[in-house]
Amino acid sequence: GDSVTQMEGPVTLSEEAFLTINCTYTATGYPSLFWYVQYPGEGLQLLLKATKADDKGSNKGFEATYRKETTSFHLEKGSVQVSDSAVYFCALGGGYQKVTFGTGTKLQVIP
Amino acid sequence: EAGVAQSPRYKIIEKRQSVAFWCNPISGHATLYWYQQILGQGPKLLIQFQNNGVVDDSQLPKDRFSAERLKGVDSTLKIQPAKLEDSAVYLCASSLDAGGGETQYFGPGTRLLVL
């Protein structure tokens, strides 16, 4: 079945550091790919998405590119802030394809 | 625009008891999802509704879990009888439709503790 593998956390970075959170997937067909974020005390919310190969999703300075050849959707940000501290979930699916989430990666940014 | 509403926010029960969770999706959203999120894991889809029909319930433990979405709006998820391993956060989400790439909007979740 479909699956998503994320790098294990927690990831601790200093403010203004470069962030990469790796995500690879296994799926039949061509699913949409998502990054969801859960800030402390808040519910899950969409960060960005890409619906086909080579698409780049971006939001709030975060980017991820749908790479079919490497089955990856790595999340990047050039300069993290303390307010980016959260748990990040990679997910695939959508439409009538079941949405499958990764286990989440906790990011802590220290001043 | 109001978000996805869930109640209760917290529930503590003893094993073998029953419990029900309620979800009210965003107005006009045809697709509704129930997820189970165990501590330290990602959300696991339990059931997906399109209007009042079931699209996917392949991961719903049907011997103890049931869900319904009457009139294609509100939904209720029930566990009967509960087991210790059912302790988790139950998330409800909705999307405008089930088309590829649709954004899901999540409610705050119901945290269940089974003793």
Image (cartoon, grey):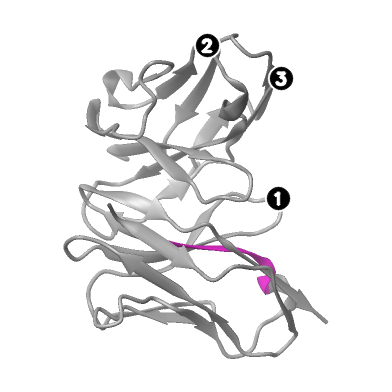
- From mark 2 to mark 1, how far is it between C-alphas? 29 Å
Which residue bears the numbered disc 1? Answer: A41
Both marks 2 and 1 on one chain: no
Tag 3 near tag 2, CB within 8 Å: no
What's the residue type where badge 1 is placed?
Gly
Which residue bears the numbered disc 2? Answer: B81
Residue B28 seen in render: no
Label 3: state its secondary structure.
loop
Label 1: state its secondary structure.
loop
Q: Looking at the image, is B80 positioned above or below residue A14?
A: above
Q: Residues within 10 Å of mark 1 (few under 14, many from 20)?
A: few
Q: Looking at the image, is A95 positioned above or below residue A66?
A: above
The mark nearer the N terminus, 3 or 2, is 2
Q: Which residues are magenta?
A: A84-90
**Residue A58 picture location, percent across and down:** 43, 79
**Which chain is disc 1 placed on?**
A
- From mark 1 to mark 3, how far is it between C-alphas? 24 Å
Q: Main secondary structure of the magenta part?
A: strand
Assign the C terminus of chain B to one quadrant of the image.
top right
**Residue B7 picture location, percent across and down:** 58, 26
What's the residue type where badge 3 is placed?
Leu
Q: Is residue B22 left or right of residue B49?
A: right
What's the residue type where badge 2 is placed?
Pro
Which residue bears the numbered disc 3? Answer: B115
